[in-house]
Amino acid sequence: MTGFIDLPDYASAMMSDNLLPTPELYNFGFDLIDKRAVERDKAAFIYVDANTGAKETYQFSDLSRASNRFANALQEIGAKKGDFAFLMIPRIPAWYEVMIGCIKLGVIAMPGTNLLQPKDVEYRINKARARFAIVTSDHAEKIEAIRDRCPTLETVVLIGAAREGWIEYEAACATANEILDRADLEVTRSDETMLAYFTSGTTGFPKLVPRNHDYAIAHALTARYWQDLGEGDVHWTLSDTGWAKAAWGKLFGQWQMGATILLYNPDPGFDADAHLKLFAQYGVTTFCAPPTIFRIFAQMDLSPYDLSSLRHTVSAGEPLNPEAIRAWNDATGTTIHDGYGQTETINIVANVPGMEIRPGSMGKPLPGLNIDIVDDDGSRLGVDEVGNIAIRTDGPAWPPGLFSGYYEDIAANSSCFRNGWYFTGDIAAKDADGYIWFVGRADDLISSSGYRISPFEVESALIEHEAVAESAVVGKKDDMRGEIVKAYVILAEGFQGGTVMEKELQDFVKTITAPYKYPREIVFVTELPKTISGKIRRVELREMANAQ
């Protein structure tokens, strides 16, 4: 038995017609956290804080009691099932206590990244008509700045300090009962909203993505097949608590598989040395980080660090360049297993352990999901044909982990749900063996002289050059070719921009990928426009390119 959800190996799972049955009623807080606290109590997470020096281990029983106290305190201030609560809490134990307490009550937690500014907070609270805001003391001023412009915001809870007009989190929990009787609460159905995330907003305003209670169950697929987790693992995912990646790697699937989570609250910025020392200190066995982190590690001498506890590595977000993959493999003996998914899904495509890894491929669809490459009408495409990554939605059961629609956004829902498919908005091709190869966002594809060019492919070629620290590629309108490839490049330290470097990079790209994909224009910059989550806003770069 692997955790409380027993899943077969990948090959067997692909043959199953009912891999992950969902009960009518489900609540992760009661049915997983509290159940583990009684039946298999063990370390739920290890908390390490670079800012305070805290190092603590929390059992499931600790988490059960703490979340009960918060749920009772939340009831005392009038919260009820279906209310939205905006959260801005860093990687500290209170995030778990609040998230699980909200889930138990049926209050819809709406996590926001700690990088949000007042206008971002205002937009999110008003979009959801949230009644509550629960934040740490370093974010109190952001709430105060917009409080008068949020008419539905009734109650604000402050973690880590006392402030006039706010409910003090620690004091409220200290006097609350640690027993919460499920029978006294409204039941939560699997198909009712449990929490909600905002998308990163790379092409427009962030969209609100409600996630039902069965979303927690579906992440067993993420943890079992992509992250390869079991009872003895210590798993570490690098992610801000405000993004769905935290649900992927710090919350649902890991505890279903019985793993212990490393919750590391870092200093501002990224201290690679501090991160790398944690592997040996806490016996990290499985690790997930965005490609940017592996690129940083690839520039370091990793030999002084003991990484021997690590047995499995995963990454998602964008293709990794070969140098970063090789450097990590040389240092740890693990190959980075790429995966793919969205805020709107669980992990849906992955390089599963035991599967042949083809560098550059996202892997194959996870069990329980009917995923294919289709044209704009929903017709399946052939081998190596470029089209939309889509999930079939008209089967006998709703695809596990797929959201049911954006919150109050008819236009967006009509665009992505059509002809019996959910269109992810991403473009890819599938080879003869079923491996999926990412091409780019549908909105970002460049059409030049009849060719469809992926910005990711050109960026991946550029980043292999020693002079390139970072790049972003877009299409620029051109009377003759329709569009041309234009690159914005940040140079590594010690390199100089200009016509000579431009020509060198253009020639280099021609040797890495098809010559017609090379950037006909290159602009050297010191920074790139990005979303709060760090994703490049190509829509802004396209506007810049076409305005020049």
Image (cartoon, rainbow, N blue to C red):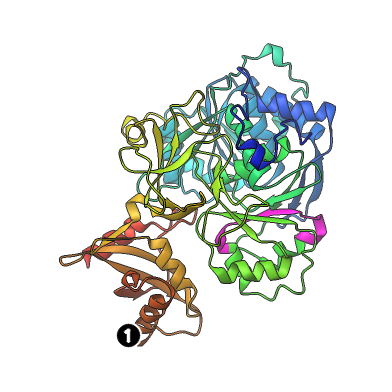
Q: Nearer the viewer, residue 98 or 302?
A: 302
**Residue located farthest toward the bottom when viewing the structure as drawn:** 500
User: Considering only vertical position in the picture, is 38 above or below 264?
Assistant: above
Which stretch appears magenta?
Answer: 279-292
Q: Quadrant of residue 338?
A: bottom right
Q: Nearer the viewer, residue 142 or 522?
A: 522
What is the residue that sits farthest to the front in this orientation? Answer: 432
Question: Which residue is painted at 64% across and 34% down in the image?
Answer: 99
In the rendered image, which quarter is residue 174 located in?
A: top right
Is 66 left or right of 361, judged from the image as shown?
Answer: right
Q: Quadrant of the N terminus?
A: top right
Quarter occupied by residue 136: top right
Q: How many marks?
A: 1
The C terminus sits in image quarter: bottom left
Instruction: Give the residue drawn at x 42%, y 58%.
Output: 536
Residue at image point 71% right, 42% down: 93
Would you place residue 113 above or below residue 61 in this image?
below
Name the residue nearer the viewer: 132 or 68: 68
Asked whether the viewer can see residue 424, the reply is: yes
Position in image of residue 63 (x %, y %) = 76, 34
Q: Which residue is at a point 45% across and 47% down the rendered structure image?
A: 200
The kind of residue tagged 1 is: Thr
Q: Which residue is mark 1?
A: 499
- Which element type, helix, strand or loop, lies under badge 1? helix
Residue 184 % position (x, y) = 68, 12
Is any atom of residue 223 visible in this view? Answer: no
Residue placed furthest toward the left: 479
* Image coords of residue 397 (percent x, y): 51, 24
Q: Position of residue 405 (x, y in %)?
A: 42, 30
